[in-house]
Amino acid sequence: MGYKMYFFRTARGEREVRIFLRALPPRHRAKCVDYLDRVRQHGTRLPANIVKHLEQGLWEARPEYGGIEYRFFFFQSGDKIGVVSAIVKKRQKVERSVIERALRRVDEMRLLWQEQEHGKPA
């Protein structure tokens, strides 16, 4: 099917996930981009080793390269994928504050998309 993928923008207009990707070593970046491309193509219909549902519609893409685990937090809404944040996973479990931040960003993007659909200024 294929989805349109959007990256969260901060109040200053920065796309932190893109900045995160650019800072990675080339092979690590290629693996992460490959996972995001799979998400763009298939949404959440991927095996658990690639994506995992966390809560409230928040998912994580789970690439790993050279023993380093990355997490890209995203949600799916209709034909859109919103990528809201990315981290290097350093602990057994992702910290609650990281999940809460991602959930706030999901809410922000959903609201923005809803306003755009109804013709309200963004």
Image (spheres, rainbow, N blue to C red):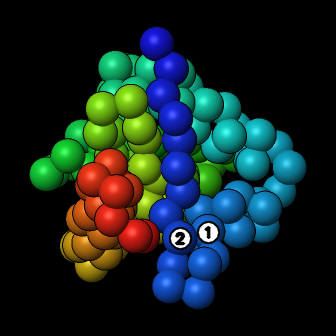
Horizontal and vertical percent position of residue 99: 27, 67
Horizontal and vertical percent position of residue 74: 39, 49
Q: Is 7 positioned to the left or the right of 74 in the image? A: right
Residue 20, compared with residue 49, is above or below; it is below
Horizontal and vertical percent position of residue 37: 61, 31
In the rendered view of the protein, which quadrant contains the C terminus?
bottom left
Residue 95 seen in this snapshot: no
Extreme-bottom residue of the structure: 12
Q: Is 115 positioned to the left or the right of 14 in the image? A: left
Residue 100, compared with residue 53, is above or below; it is below
Extreme-front residue of the structure: 119
Residue 9: give its label: 2
10 Å neighbourhood of mark 1: few (<14), some, or many (≥20)? some
Q: Please say if the residues under marks 1 and 2 sit with CB atoms less than 8 Å apart.
A: yes
The residue lying toward the viewer, choosing from 68 and 83, is: 83
The kind of secondary structure element at disc 1 is loop
Q: Amino acid at mark 1?
A: Arg
Q: Is 81 positioned to the left or the right of 21 in the image? A: left
Q: Residue at horizontal 50%, vertical 85%?
A: 11
Number of dots carrying numbers: 2
Distance of mark 1 from mark 2, alpha carbons?
Answer: 5 Å
The kind of secondary structure element at disc 2 is loop
The residue lying toward the viewer, choosing from 88 and 98, is: 98
Residue 21 seen in this snapshot: yes
Q: Which residue is mark 1?
A: 15
Q: In which quadrant of the rendered view does residue 15 lie? A: bottom right
- Work out whether mark 1 precedes mark 2 in sequence or the reverse, and give the earlier one: 2
Q: Residue at horizontal 33%, vertical 65%?
A: 120
Q: Amino acid at mark 2?
A: Arg
Q: Is 117 positioned to the left or the right of 90 in the image? A: left
Horizontal and vertical percent position of residue 87: 51, 65
Q: Residue at horizontal 51%, vertical 79%?
A: 10
